Each structure stands twice: as C-alpha cells, then as structure tokens.
Image: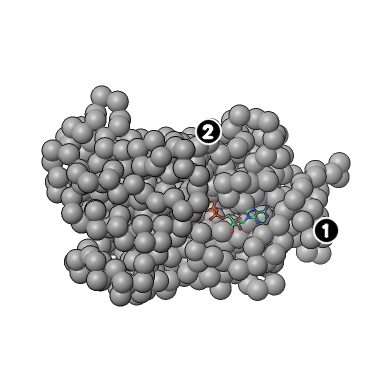
Amino acid sequence: MALPKISVAIAGGGIGGLSLAAGLQNCPHLDVQVYEGTKIYKDVGGGLAIHPNGIRAMELVGENVKRAFFDSAELSAKDEDVELTTDVVVGQGKNTHEMLASLGAAKGRKTVARADLLNGLAKIVQKDRLHFGKRLARIEEKQNGKVALHFEDGSQASVDCLIGADGIHSKTRSYLLGENHPATASKDQGWILFRRLVPMEEARKSLDEKLLTKVPIYCGLGSAINCMPVHGGRTYQITVTAVKAAAWNETDDNENLVVREDFYKDWIPEVQAIVELLNKDPGEPWVIADHDRAPYYHRGNVVMIGDAAHSITPFAGNGASQAFEDASTMLTLLKEVKSVWQIPKAFEAFDAIRRPRSQKVVELSRMFGRLYAFMEEGVGDDLDKIRKKMREAAAIMNDADLQEQNKEAVRYFTWLLSAEG
Ligand SMILES: Cc1cc2nc3c(=O)[nH]c(=O)nc-3n(C[C@H](O)[C@H](O)[C@H](O)COP(=O)(O)OP(=O)(O)OC[C@H]3O[C@@H](n4cnc5c(N)ncnc54)[C@H](O)[C@@H]3O)c2cc1C
C-alpha cells in the first residue's frame, strides 16, 4: 500500500514560494499547495537584476524555473550568451564618471520586471496547486502534529508542514519569533526610495540612447541612483534612493513629495536629467527596510524562507537570488525526507546551512548602501577602498558553491537523523 503523501503548504506565491513549488510538485511523496494572498501580481518593487548566484540556484531548482526567468527577462532575453552588468559609476564629488565596479557580470544575467517573472513562474506551477486570494491570517500547531492555516476569507487548511514564503511582513515570521520579538518587524534603514516607470519613448526624449540599454548605478554623497530597462525594453525604470535627511525636507508629508532637485545640483548632468524625469511623476516614496537577524528560521513543522526569513535592502540586488538559493536548498532537503517525523530535521538542516549565509548578505547589502553613498566608516569616497570592499562582498554573494551548499545541508540532515537514533 502506498504511504500517504506529506502535505506541504507554502504561504506566499512570490519568487521563493513559486520556484520552490515548481520543484516540489515533481516529488511523488509530497503534496504541495501554494496559498498566495493577492489575486493578481503587480510590479510592486519594480525591476530586478538577478545575479549569477541567483541564476545558478534557479538551475539547481529546475531547468523550467530558469527558462521561466529567461522567457520573462529583458534585452536579448532569449539569448543567454548576452552579458549584462551593473556599472557602478561615480556621479558626484571629485572623481565623477570614474567606474567603481562592474557588478554581477555573468552569462545570462538579465533584468526582469517583477510581475513578468512572477507570472512566468506561476505558469510552471500546476494550476490546481496555486491558490490566489488566500491570505494567511493565523497559524495553529495542533497536538496531532498537523498545522492549521486560517485564511482571511474564513477558509482553513490542515497540513503536515508550513513553509512561510510570505515576504517582508510575514505572518509566519511573527508566528515563529513572536510579535514582540525585536527582529520580527522590518527595520527602517534610514533611506527612502523613489521609483518611476517611464515609457521608453518619453525616456528617449530626455536621456542619451546609450543609457537606455544599461543598468547603471550612480553613487555620490547621500544617494544612489539606479536605472534599468524592463517590460521587454518598453519601459525605463528609474530608482532613486537617498538618505532620508539629505533628499527631502523632514517636515514634508508624503503627499506630493519629490526628490529635492537642488540636492543633485553638483551631480553629473545625466543624473540631473534622470532626477528631473523621475520628478515628473515620483509616486509615493518607500522607506527602505530589512530584517535584523532572526535567531532561528524554523520551529517544529513551520519554517520561513526568502524575505520572510531575511528581508534584504535593494542595494546589493541579491534578495531574489537569496530566495532562489533558499528554494534550491529546501527542495534538495525535502527530496530526502521519507516520513513526516523527518520534516523538523530537514527544516533544522535548512536553518543551519542557509541562515548564516543569508544573514551575511543582509549585512553586505546594508554595507553596499553605505558604500554607494560614500558613508562607510573608514572608507568614505576613497575609490580604492570602496572597490576592495565591493569586490570582497560580490565574491561572497556570487562565487558561492551552491551545489556544495546543498550537499552540506543533506549531510547535516543525515547526521541529525542518525543522532536521533
Ligand atoms: C525596490 C526593491 C528593489 C529590489 N531589487 C532587487 C534586485 O535587483 N535583485 C534582487 O535579487 N532582489 C531585489 N530586491 C529584493 C527582492 O525583491 C526580494 O528579496 C524577493 O522578492 C524576495 O522574494 P520572496 O518570494 O521571499 O518574497 P516576495 O517576492 O515579497 O513574495 C512574497 C509573496 O507572499 C505574498 N504574501 C504576503 N503575505 C501573505 C500572506 N499573509 N498570505 C499569503 N500570501 C502572502 C505576497 O503577496 C507575495 O506574493 C529588491 C527589493 C526592493 C524592495
């Protein structure tokens, strides 16, 4: 007689949740269901640049995940041989136009609009496994070992385990750590972010054509500006991040707020043109936040992955890649699980292997913000020191051996099982 399948609920059909589901649905011993709070994906947070570690992690989850990414990505999207790098350029101060770094050079590196990527990933998850409009409201662990999920619409599900992939304001995180834990809520990092999606035709009128196919980051005291083509080159995304006090008047309310153009008056002309274009329709600014270190990512049969576990500021452009790495390691571990009682051990192994690395990337991303804004202590606008720090940090993020990471997770899982007796 065939053993009953282990039921796995994923709360949150974002980048981490969908890619994990795409892998888990092929495991005959598992029954995976994804519960996504929204009814339709929107371009919240805009375009993403995916770094080499993210692309390698996708490959480890499955060729279909990588294909979904390439099919929704930008520029020569179908051509994996085209390289796209983020050129970090000095936009203000004594070394203007100097190249600081060329980040993330990798075959197949692309930018992608968030909603395009999510829709692409959703297509490869079997339809009957993906439930939209199911926002997790409450989690309850039952004495019989089951996890009860209560959704905002009043419906419920009972499963063997829950993987919370529900983003920065995760219900799973506040359940696991407790609502009052200092690391539960996201933490304001003292920056604001303005973003505008400019129709390419309009961008062409103000900006040099050469700029429109690139992904530059301009650095200067107190601010960093990033641009990228999205939506198959039909839209040009402008993102201006600035240290709060520098870029706006603290007494302003959020309505009708624009980036202070006078703040950029000593920046290079192309940055001034970008800021001017942004200010034609700057939208609501965002506060840039991330998570302080969670002391653990799992308890019993409940675990968190992706931004729920380790939300990362956008400066290093590696949050989505970390979510792909989580999916890859979790998939590898759950393939090994033979019975429900082994699930907490698999989650413990996930925690042991993925928590140190993902939390390191949170710290590195904060540092990237300070480096871009010439605010890293002992570094300032010293370009050689900035380059060295960036090189070291990029190597940690991009050059990790992800196959070895997964093997290490399985070794640890096996050891935990043997220690159990
Ligand atoms: C402005 C900005 C720029 C960024 N740029 C980059 C970049 O260039 N490169 C990069 O790698 N990363 C970037 N990131 C980070 C990246 O977006 C995240 O790290 C990544 O989206 C994390 O994926 P995730 O699946 O964990 O979470 P999310 O993508 O946030 O997905 C969480 C999902 O859970 C759903 N959800 C939330 N609550 C519930 C609930 N209670 N019940 C059910 N569903 C729920 C949400 O609707 C969402 O679909 C950027 C982030 C920001 C804010």
Q: Quadrant of the C terminus?
A: top right
Q: Is residue 137 left or right of residue 10?
A: right
Q: Residue at x 67, y 45 (%)?
A: 172
Give residue 154's mark.
Answer: 1
Q: Residue at x 53, y 32 (%)?
A: 293
Q: Residue 396 placed where, x, y %?
A: 34, 40
The amino acid type, in three-letter code, at marker 1 is Gly
Image quadrant in which you'd find residue 270: bottom left
Residue 318 visible in the displayed image: no
In the image, farthest residue toward the top: 378
Give residue 292's mark.
Answer: 2
Other residues around mark 1 within 10 Å, as few (<14) / some (14–19) / many (≥20): few
Q: Residue at x 40, y 51 (%)?
A: 258
Give the alpha-carbon distance from disc 1 to disc 2, as whole Å: 32 Å
Secondary element type, mark 1: loop
Q: Quadrant of the N terminus?
A: bottom right
The amino acid type, in three-letter code, at marker 2 is Asp
Q: Residue 285 placed where, x, y %?
A: 46, 50
Query: Which sits earlier in the primary sequence, circle 1 or circle 2?
Result: 1
Image quadrant in which you'd find residue 242: top left
Secondary element type, mark 2: loop
Q: Residue at x 79, y 53 (%)?
A: 150
Q: Is residue 377 left or right of residue 112?
A: left
